[in-house]
Image (cartoon, coloured by chain):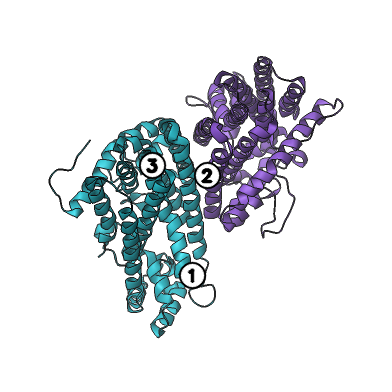
Chain colours: A purple, B cyan
Amino acid sequence: MTTIAHTPTPHTLAALTTRRARALTEPLLREAVSRLEPWMALISSYHLGWCRADGSPAESDSGKAVRPALALLAAEAVGAPAEAALPGAAAVELVHNFSLIHDDIMDGDEERRRRPTAWKEYGVPGAILAGDALQVLAFDVLLAGGGPLGQVAAGHLTLALRELVDGQARDIQFAARPWSGPGTVTVAEYRAMAMGKTGALLAGASAIGAVLGGADEPLARTLAEAGGQLGLAFQCVDDILGIWGDPAVTGKPVRGDLRERKKSLPVIAALAASESAADQLADLLADRQSVGDEGAAEGGSETALLKAADLIEECGGRRACEREAELALARAHDLLDLVPMPAEVRAQYTALADSCVARVT
Amino acid sequence: MTTIAHTPTPHTLAALTTRRARALTEPLLREAVSRLEPWMALISSYHLGWCRADGSPAESDSGKAVRPALALLAAEAVGAPAEAALPGAAAVELVHNFSLIHDDIMDGDEERRRRPTAWKEYGVPGAILAGDALQVLAFDVLLAGGGPLGQVAAGHLTLALRELVDGQARDIQFAARPWSGPGTVTVAEYRAMAMGKTGALLAGASAIGAVLGGADEPLARTLAEAGGQLGLAFQCVDDILGIWGDPAVTGKPVRGDLRERKKSLPVIAALAASESAADQLADLLADRQSVGDEGAAEGGSETALLKAADLIEECGGRRACEREAELALARAHDLLDLVPMPAEVRAQYTALADSCVARVT
């Protein structure tokens, strides 16, 4: 096990925390994936960055392992060694990647982590099935490796999955809602969606880690709530990056969320402002010719997208989103403060939490 | 609980057995589905035949409830009341329907049980997500309702799901294999695929029912093996109906499996015959213009499809498939004979098993 010597900066500490989680979890993930039917193992390994499309080994980006890190920290927070939570850490990472593979199909996204998405590389049927396979594998790893606590932990996994699907379903339905007038998506609806889509699995990771570490239900629930708030903060930050993020850093196209006409929080908050700029923004967004794919095809949308981004900022949408992230982070810290834990673990927890938001502020 | 009076014919007994399973399981299924996010509940309810596309109540075909019936019978076989297996019966039916919804997307099938498929009605994203929701719900129902035996039962569910995905993956890959020469799909490969795609969940239903009924592991495994063999028999019969079935009875287009160029057992067995008719069949099937969708579009394929069906019969493909079904059924009976159980339960088990094959012989 890697221990943290000296006193690194919070930023370094967060990186060390996720790097340790990746190092501890990956052998179990690789072993689990290797047990899949070869084609399913290939698609999963490709998606996870372990190989190229043809199966030859590669070391691409596997993601930041925030969920495994939370599972391991939760176990340590309740006094168990990180290793106690390993099946849980692997399970939540498998579920995370199942949801990414299916989300990419549902959203029609062609790129993830700077490579073609799984469905783009292997077709929709293979990608649907590989997602299904990873979801099953998550339960397999947790039930087989979780010992007598596996059933309780699996209960938390089903809860997280149910809320995740629920959040994703709300998100898809947002697309059909109007940009203004009755039926406009509210900030409260957004929050419920984000708590499901992103919060649920961070909450689940924390609860599962705590349960496998021997925590009682109230303690597991407090850590889960902290994880959920972190998830909300995380999603808010993602939303800001989706409009104002630097493509060189995010690996996503500039103003991509506006281009895809996503009803993300900065947009929703801006539209809720009672200003003429908000009306102007609604008109602009409702016009598929200017900001939609049609606009992009005609090459005339970049100016409109930039204009929309500026209007969102003018209406306070960006600030409202940052504020939502900061509040969620503060709630996470308050919840973590309720849980007695070793100082070293708290330092890592805090650093990891802050790093979720530090990406934009 | 419905009990079986008098001595009904085996056919009637099988129908009573599945009808009882449907009646016992459906309240639990409805309660579980009603807990889903409203849009997910709508798509699932539509798929399950409980409502029309707009959500208004309907009583469409929900399927035959063979899997719930097996779960309930397995519990009764080991001396427990059928009710002990109810969470298991609901879980396997949820998994079955999850796999149907995803299969229809993967296969591009537009109709099921005489209605538009879920993806056709609600779009691919909604259908992918509804499938995911039902898979989660299966674990939820089993872990929440299975009591202390829930974890063991959930282990059997993950095993069944893993094999199901494995079989489906093999099946998809069959499509890319040649019709003749090296790389032709073998009967052994077909069997492994069918044991996964169809056998695994019938095996899982039996194992889960037995476990929830208090059976020890060897007993559960024997009943699971019997279920797996029934699944193989079931798939063979489906394959025969897929070519020679009456559309009025099956609800599927005549010679649909040939039209979709499926490498089903009658075809594989026929191609393996060392006869000139087999070569002729391979040439015919390899020609997308004559039997593929292109042929259908040109309206010139019906004759070719009929010709292919006749060649398959001439090469013994149909007979080989019937034989495979009969052998699998016989193995199922042999396995069931090893398990002491009440005479009334055995009669239902036998009737249900025989009815799987009686659909064609």
Residues at marks 1 and 2 on the same chain:
no
Nearer the observer, B42 or A219: A219
Q: Residues within 10 Å of mark 3 (few under 14, many from 20)?
A: many
The correct choice, above or below, for B184 with respect to A131 in the image is below
Q: List the residue tagged with mark 1.
A: B185
Q: Residue type at mark 3?
A: Ala
How far across and how far down the image is residue A328, in percent? 65, 20
How far across and how far down the image is residue B94, in percent? 40, 42
Q: Left or right: where does residue B82 sit relative to residue A78? A: left
Q: Residue at x 68, y 23 (%)?
A: A77
The correct choice, above or below, for B302 with respect to B101 in the image is below
Q: Residue type at mark 1?
A: Val
Which of the 4 quarters of the picture holds residue A247?
top right
- Label pair 3/1, CB-CB below 8 angstroms: no
Q: Quadrant of the C terminus of chain A?
A: top right
Can you see residue A330?
yes
Nearer the observer, B274 or A314: B274
Nearer the observer, A357 or A312: A357
**Callout 1 secondary element:** loop
How far across and how far down the image is residue A321, in percent? 66, 24
Measure the C-alpha gap from mark 1 to mark 2: 27 Å
Query: Mark 3 falls within which chain?
Result: B
**Callout 3 secondary element:** loop
The correct choice, above or below, for A20 with respect to A269 in the image is below
Q: Which mark is residue A136?
A: 2
Measure the C-alpha gap from mark 3 to mark 2: 24 Å
Measure the C-alpha gap from mark 3 to mark 1: 38 Å
Depth-wise, is mark 3 or mark 2 nearer the camera? 3
Which of the 4 quarters of the picture holds residue A52?
bottom right
Q: Residue at x 29, y 55 (%)?
A: B353
Q: Which mark is residue B215?
A: 3
